[in-house]
Image (tube, grey):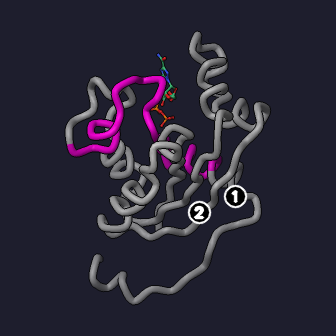
Amino acid sequence: MEQTFIMIKPDGVQRGLVGEIIGRFEKKGFTLKGLKLITVDRAFAERHYSDLSAKPFFNGLVEYIISGPVVAMVWEGKNVVTTGRKIIGATNPADSAPGTIRGDYAIDIGRNVIHGSDAVESARKEIALWFPEGIAEWRSSLHSWIY
Ligand code: RTP
């Protein structure tokens, strides 16, 4: 089953949006496979965003991500990468539709509350980076009500 890496950024944690965001993924029917509250250092944040190192906003982005604890998660389900990005909404909250997380809770691209992997391959890399200890194995009778 497909997995994605979802991170509630420091602004989302400080603003008390953790429960709301987890609830949206849970109620959709996705399965929570990894979860931790963690403050990362500069080297780790730079590694996570290494693809963006040439961007003019890179330093500000790294400062933002290391500014407080984040909630790192692995969610599992059919098409969870693409559907997760839809639940999150467009990168710039000015373009995010109402009903999406960023559309409902963010205003500025530099404080857009949440990250979600953009492809199955990047999800695999991000899960390996953030959860080197591995993720939960659990059986659920829920699946037969969703698939
Ligand atoms: P994310 O990785 O956080 O899910 O975001 P994304 O794929 O939707 O967007 P991406 O282009 O990968 O950018 C990563 C994060 O960088 C910040 N950003 N700031 N012009 C700016 O100031 C700017 N552009 C992007 C955002 O926090 C974005 O989520």
Name which quarter of the figure residue 127 lies in.
Answer: bottom right
Q: Is residue 4 above or below residue 110?
A: below
- In percent of width and height, residue 144 lies at 31, 85
Residue at image location 64% in from the left, 40% down from the top: 68
- In percent of width and height, residue 108 lies at 39, 23
Looking at the rendered image, the disc whose residue lies closer to the viewer, 1 or 2, is 2
Q: Residues within 10 Å of mark 1 (few under 14, many from 20)?
A: some
Looking at this view, is 87 or 2 the one in front?
87
Residue at image location 20% in from the left, 39% down from the top: 98
Residue under pointer 2: 35
Looking at this view, is 57 or 20 the one in front?
20
Q: Is residue 142 above or below residue 84?
A: below
Name which quarter of the figure residue 46 lies in.
Answer: top right
User: Does the magenta segment cover residue 86?
Assistant: no
Q: Is residue 106 above or below residue 114?
A: above
- In percent of width and height, residue 99 lies at 22, 45
Residue at image location 32% in from the left, 48% down from the top: 87
Residue 60 as seen in the image, left or right of residue 40: left
Which type of secondary structure does the marked residue at label 1 adopt? loop
Q: Amino acid at mark 1?
A: Phe
In the rendering, which numbered label is found on residue 131?
Answer: 1
Q: Amino acid at mark 2?
A: Leu
- In percent of width and height, residue 120 lies at 50, 49
Residue at image location 79% in from the left, 33% down from the top: 43
Badge 1 or badge 2: first in the primary sequence: 2
Looking at this view, is 16 or 129 the one in front?
16
In space, the residues marked 1 and 2 are separated at their CA atoms by 9 Å
Q: Quadrant of the C terminus?
A: bottom left
Find the magenta span and give its range.
99-126
Determine whether the beta carbon of the residue marked 1 sits less than 8 angstroms from the nearest atom of ligand 1: no
